[in-house]
Amino acid sequence: MKPLLGLLNHELNAHLQVIDHPSFNQMFTGFSVKYQTAVFVKVFAATRVEKFAMERSVNQQLSDRVLTSWRLADGRAVLVMQDLDLTPLPALTPALVTQMGRTLCQFHQTVQLATGPVAPNDRFIRTADRLARLHECAGYPRWQRYYNWFMDYRVQLNSALLRQPVVSLHGDFGVRNCRYCDGRLILIDFERVKPGIAQEDVVKFFQQDLNGRSDLIQAFWNGYGASAVLDRLAVAWLDFDCALGIMTYVQQRPDPAFETVGQRLIGAVNRMVAGQK
């Protein structure tokens, strides 16, 4: 079998360059003679074809940039899209964060998913699965105690989560997945899109990109619009679930700065649990 780059160049009649970026996917860019345009190629491992399908589906809903896709003999999935001239965001200001809030709100309300909403019980199972994957970590016994504590308040959590409207979450919202394109703020990278409640999409963003700054968080909600307020228990649960997601990620791809965000969220959970005892 030809190396991947050779296969892609042959299929697209292109001279692609590898994009060196920390990711579970392989990415390439270059000019395709076949499509007479610059292309962005994203190759998903055979174990990540559901993410490939989501990335393709959401892009097809939002634009006409998807050119083609196919599966390789080894099960990997190839998605070819028109490349965009994207500009990273400048330093965050309240006005820019407000604009990010408007953009995310529009995404939440526009994208339609074939799957149904996630029931609270499914959320608990997902979090338990994340926790199980962390059983060899030094913090596991403490995180298990937190999970058990939340389960003591399961009925209250169910009630709080069910009161929230279900939207299409981006799944990895933050500065790195926001870009300017032709002067317009857009979102990119849709492989983690899923149903959920709006607050789930901003836990990591508030801590990682906004550093917990209350003025910027308020600016975001000013742009997003009215959103139902979650009680402290539900907020702590979302913090906990997000922290475990970060910890499972850094076990596979070490990232000290990102791990610090997870530890900060765990600290908030610890304060909540300690305050209730």
Image (tube, rainbow, N blue to C red):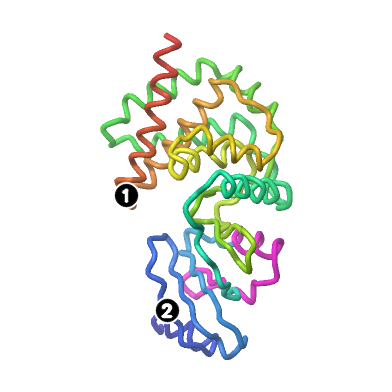
Residue 4's disc number: 2
Task: Name the amino acid type tagged 2.
Answer: Leu
Report the side of 215 relative to 101 (left or right).
left
For the point 50% across and 15% down, the residue is: 152
Query: Residue 207 sits in which quadrant?
Result: top left
Identify the secondary structure beneath mark 2. helix
Which one is in front in this view, the residue at disc 2 or the one at disc 1?
1
Magenta span: 53-79
Q: With respect to residue 179, does 97 lie above or below?
A: above
Residue 136's disc number: none
Residue 74, magenta (yes or no): yes
Residue 100 in the image, given as x and y percentages of width and height: 60, 49
Report the side of 98 relative to 133 (left or right).
right
Residue 85 in the image, given as x and y percentages of width and height: 56, 72
Viewer-closest of 114 and 89 = 89
Residue 95 in the image, given as x and y percentages of width and height: 59, 47
Q: Quadrant of the N terminus?
A: bottom left
Viewer-closest of 252 and 261 = 261
Between the residue at mark 2 and the residue at mark 1, the CA separation in whole angstroms equals 28 Å
Q: Quadrant of the C terminus?
A: top left
For the point 55% across and 40% down, the residue is: 202
Task: Name the amino acid type tagged 1.
Answer: Asp
Q: Which residue is mark 1?
A: 255
Asked whether the beta carbons under mark 2 and mark 1 sit within 8 Å of each other, the answer is no
Report the side of 146 relative to 111 (left or right).
left
For the point 34% across and 47% down, the residue is: 250
